Image (cartoon, helix red, strand yellow):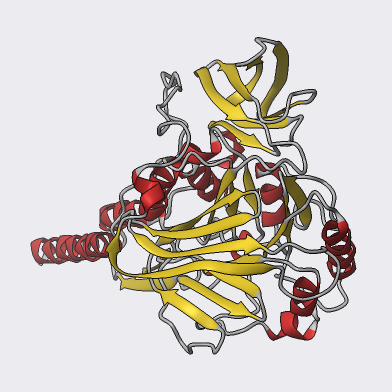
Amino acid sequence: MDFDFDFDFDFDGTSKKALAIRVRMREKHPMTILPCLVALLWTQPAPDPGPGLPRRPYVQHVTPEGLSLLWQTQRPETCDVRLRSLTTRDTWERTSGPAQHHEVRFEGLVPSARYEYTVSTAAGTFRATVRTAPATGSAEPFTFLVYGDTRNGHGVHRALAQVMAFDDADFVIHTGDFVSDGQRHDKWNLFLEYSWPLMRRMPLYPTLGNHENAFGDGLDLYRRNFEVPDDGPFPEMVYAFTWGNSRFFVLDTNQAFSGAPQTSWLRTQLAEAALDPRIRHLFVSLHQSAYTSGPHGPQQDLLDSGLVDDLRHHGVLMTFSAHDHFYERGRVDGLHYVITAGGGAPIYAIKTHQPHSLVTETVHHYCRLRVEGDLVELTAVRLDGSLLDSLVLRRAPGPSEGSGPRHVVVREHRATGRETPAAFVAPPGPPPPTLPWQDDAPRSGVDAPRSRNPLFGAALVLGGAAVALLFLALRRRRRS
Ligand SMILES: [Fe+2]
Ligand SMILES: [Fe+2]
């Protein structure tokens, strides 16, 4: 009989390499197939577990007066949720379900205040603290983190998120390509598991990447996984939010930008923000960068659409992108661009250094931004905690209207060796967080990755085939 099978090794999510093995057998016997089947099952990617896997509670859509909690249980159940103010001792109680996917929102909270939430499920009780956003226009200092292209680099992502958690930031922006395939529940479970040191106590603002499969089924999962302000032309893909004295715009650059509804929406939003005296800094997150020294090259559509001109005209300080897996910082007529795509995906080599590029490094990393009134400090930190790059900018006095850069460079430092970022050694504010979780819940539902070495799997398949052939040969010899 003929016995064929194919299987894929998922090396990086895009370049699947197929290994096809054809075993031609002249005799039919189940024992000849069994070793091959065992090897095949061993090497296959983990089966899609469906939506039933538990996701520990995580924080989304934090505003000065509200916040959301999301989690997933093993089976449909009703969960009790309690939110307690750590300053006034006021409490709010909710129930959620019966359902597997849970979303609970609290409103009527106080800006810049700490709250403790408790989620009680059949699998255990989970507790953490979260802080609401400062009031719009507040000069209160805050810190946010930016990283992207985590994809299937689970080991790096897990380590990086734990390093990032020591920064005690207020929120995190992900620049896209969260997972290798946005249609896979199990991939999203892994992302949410490994980013949990951050997401359990701060909101993550997502940027849609090409790997989220926005044109397939992935978009439904993407929207389900995150909750963000519903104020843009494409719900949860294009949106804006304010944190203190800064306004953030998240765009979808996976679709053509020229003439798209988000173009006119963005122009209106930028014009309003530029005229708002409470807003001192504007930031934009978009997966593909208009400028890059990487293999994807500059995004001509973004340049042709006039997007970059709009950003400069309205005084946007900085853009954050991903897609080319490395770190790059540059400046074009006062507009600073940062490519931060070192969250775990395979690192790319620099292809062509662009004339606007100031710093490039092919390394896993993340970015930390500290905003203190008119000062903005960008620090890029490698996975090992060492300083990669730093930049301090100050908002210049003067009117918000009119074109041209509104920030001046105070200090710029490209780390040439292994320097330790000062803020990393002695982070401002409270000490690094302890783990307040009562993590007594059984973790059987959490989709820990199976240890699968593709070479080991291939050896198993070939070994299985050899055993089968040996078995056939022995049978034939016995008959003869
Ligand atoms: Fe990408
Ligand atoms: Fe990518």
Q: Nearer the viewer, residue 385 or 417?
A: 417
Residue 290 figure quarter: bottom right
Residue located at (80% from left, 81% from top): 305
Residue 364 x, y percent position in the rendering: 39, 63
* Residue 139 position in % (x across, y down): 68, 43
Residue at the outermost front position: 397
Residue drawn at (41%, 40%) of the image: 166
Q: Quadrant of the C terminus?
A: bottom left
Is residue 57 rendered to the left or right of residue 90? Answer: left
Residue 144: x and y in percent read: 57, 48
Using residue 235 as the reference point, say whether residue 91 is left or right of it.
left
Residue 256 in sight from this viewpoint: no
Observer-nearest residue: 95 or 325? 325
Along the line of sight, the residue nearer the viewer: 20 or 188 = 188
For residue 176, which quarter of the picture? bottom right
Q: Residue at x 65, y 25 (%)?
A: 113
Report which quarter residue 254 is drawn in. bottom right
Image check: 107 left or right of 337? Answer: right
Query: Which residue is at 71% across, 20% downward?
Result: 96
Residue 63: x percent and y percent?
73, 36
Of residues 455 and 222, the one drawn nearer to the viewer in this rendering = 222
Answer yes or no: is residue 473 visible: yes
Residue 34 lies, with reference to residue 404, above or below; the image says: above
